[in-house]
Image (cartoon, helix red, strand yellow):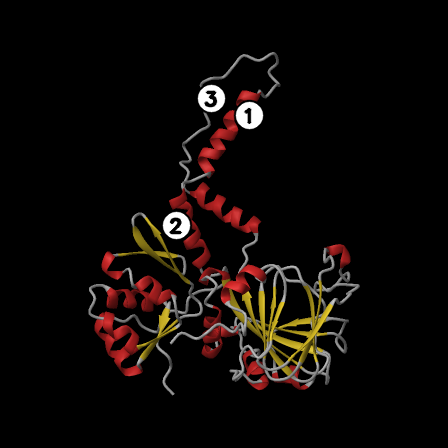
């Protein structure tokens, strides 16, 4: 049975129509039986690893007010911390803790391409990163401990922030709402709401962020892809050039011709747009890569391993999505386009709809022509993996 979304008495339809990107929402006991999948000690251990992105924010008792330190950290860095007024953040923790990856499935009412990574933070009493805003939607899941959240809708442009800091902290925060979150509570924040979280005691917070492409980056990526497809031997032409009163004049006719040329060049059809965006939005982040398996598997070895482990997992380094185009289903994994035969259409929603695939879920399809081979392709790509045995 599919897990119900953690929205309390609010239905998905009510949330999307009344709250999503409109106003904050506090959901009390959204996860009444929530067991935090990571301890403060485990979080600190992750922050000591080279491949993990982490940071420490010290409001005071650092080299400067609001000192920002980037990981990896040493054990001495943690043992020398003050008793209060600091916060440790570990980004993309879902890539290292499978239970955090599964937590994202509770928000499956949102499309895959809009869900981002999971960040986990720990703070002792008074720990905070200051009042600030985010340009994306956030679901803040309260783990062990209590935290006070104050919200405001006041302006937060650069002129309203404390100067010369590595963090974008509002200078004159004027709270309008206040909530104290306890374990299992969730605070939803749309973009642009100023929020200030302060730990009332040792506490862990799990932040499930949503992706929101910066429009300039989206446009730049589209234009770059389009330009890469243009024939470099194709020149601007103007067969209907007209006589002008002065050689320095650029005529309205010429401007219209330039505008028409650029429009024809940059505006590709809807199908091309769909295929480009599916590849763009599932592509691996710059600076990241898919962890390749130790060795490639063939069909027989993959099926034998699946029988032994009993399950197959979707990599948190890979994004899955699909579209209907060219009269067929196109699966996109880590930016790669995989056309699916009509007999494999079921694989698109199956593989992009969950993160853990039990053998019982996959078994009915393993004899379908091409399905096991598809799993082999995705495994060898690094988009699927087998869990480590205990």
How far apart, in angstroms, are the residues tagged by discs 3 and 2?
32 Å
Image height of 59 relative to 265, above or below: below
Residue identifier under label 3 = 238
How far apart, in angstroms, are the residues tagged by discs 3 and 1?
11 Å
Image height of 113 relative to 7, above or below: above
Residue identifier under label 1 = 255
Q: In x, y percent, where is residue 44? A: 58, 82
Residue identifier under label 2 = 275
Mark whose residue sits in front, 3 or 2:
2
* Labelled disc at residue 306: none
How far apart, in angstroms, are the residues tagged by discs 1 and 2?
31 Å
Quadrant for the C terminus, please. bottom left
For marks 3 and 2 on the same chain, the one whose residue lies earlier in the sequence: 3
For marks 3 and 1 on the same chain, the one whose residue lies earlier in the sequence: 3
For marks 1 and 2 on the same chain, the one whose residue lies earlier in the sequence: 1
Q: Which of 160 and 287 is in front in this view?
A: 160
Q: Few, some or many C-alpha atoms within 10 Å of disc 3 (few <14, some 14-19, many ≥20)?
A: few
> Which element carries disc 3, helix, strand or loop?
loop
Q: Few, some or many C-alpha atoms within 10 Å of disc 1 (few <14, some 14-19, many ≥20)?
A: few
Quadrant for the N terminus, please. bottom left
Image height of 160 relative to 246, above or below: below
Q: Which of 302 and 356 is in front in this view?
A: 356
Q: Residue at x 52, y 14 (%)?
A: 242
Q: In x, y percent, where is residue 356? A: 38, 75
Q: Which residue is drawn at 35% across and 66% down?
A: 351
Taking the image as drawn, is residue 381 in sight? no
State left or right for residue 204 relative to residue 221: right
Q: Residue at x 45, y 71 (%)?
A: 105
> Which element carries disc 2, helix, strand or loop?
helix
Q: Few, some or many C-alpha atoms within 10 Å of disc 2 (few <14, some 14-19, many ≥20)?
A: some
Q: In x, y percent, where is residue 381? A: 35, 65
Q: Using the rendered view, name the quadrant where residue 76 is placed.
A: bottom right
């Amino acid at each position: 049975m599919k897990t119900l979304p953690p929205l309390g008495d609010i239905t998905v339809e009510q949330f999307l129509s009344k709250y999503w990107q409109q106003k904050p929402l506090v959901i009390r006991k959204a996860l009444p039986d929530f067991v935090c999948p990571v301890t403060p000690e485990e979080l600190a251990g992750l922050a000591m690893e080279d491949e993990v992105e982490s940071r420490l924010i010290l409001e005071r008792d650092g080299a400067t007010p609001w000192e920002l330190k980037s990981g990896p950290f040493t054990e001495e860095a943690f043992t020398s911390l003050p008793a209060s007024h600091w916060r440790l953040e570990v980004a993309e923790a879902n890539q290292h803790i499978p239970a955090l990856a599964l937590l994202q499935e509770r928000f499956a009412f949102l499309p895959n391409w809009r869900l981002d990574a999971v960040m986990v933070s720990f703070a002792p009493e008074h720990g905070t990163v200051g009042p600030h805003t985010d340009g994306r939607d956030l679901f803040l899941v309260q783990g062990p401990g209590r935290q006070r959240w104050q919200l405001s809708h006041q302006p937060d442009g650069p002129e309203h922030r404390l100067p010369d800091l590595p963090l974008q902290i509002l200078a004159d925060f004027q709270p309008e709402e206040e909530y104290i979150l306890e374990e299992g509570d969730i605070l939803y924040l749309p973009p642009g709401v100023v929020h200030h979280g302060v730990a009332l005691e040792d506490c862990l917070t799990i932040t499930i962020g949503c992706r929101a492409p910066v429009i300039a980056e989206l446009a730049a990526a589209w234009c770059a892809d389009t330009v890469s497809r243009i024939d470099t031997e194709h020149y601007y032409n103007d067969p209907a050039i007209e006589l002008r009163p002065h050689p320095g004049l650029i005529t309205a006719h010429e401007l219209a011709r330039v505008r028409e040329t650029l429009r024809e060049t940059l505006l590709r059809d809807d199908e091309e747009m769909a295929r480009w965006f599916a590849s763009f939005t599932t592509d691996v982040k710059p600076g990241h890569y898919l962890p390749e398996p130790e060795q490639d598997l063939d069909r027989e070895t993959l099926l034998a391993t699946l029988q032994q482990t009993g399950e197959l997992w979707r990599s948190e380094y890979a994004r899955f999505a699909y579209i209907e185009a060219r009269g067929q289903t196109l699966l996109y994994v880590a930016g790669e386009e995989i056309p699916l035969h009509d007999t494999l259409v079921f694989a698109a929603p199956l593989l992009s709809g969950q993160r853990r695939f039990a053998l019982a879920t996959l078994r009915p399809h393993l004899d379908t022509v091409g399905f096991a081979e598809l799993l082999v392709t995705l495994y060898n790509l690094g988009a699927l993996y087998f869990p480590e045995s205990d």
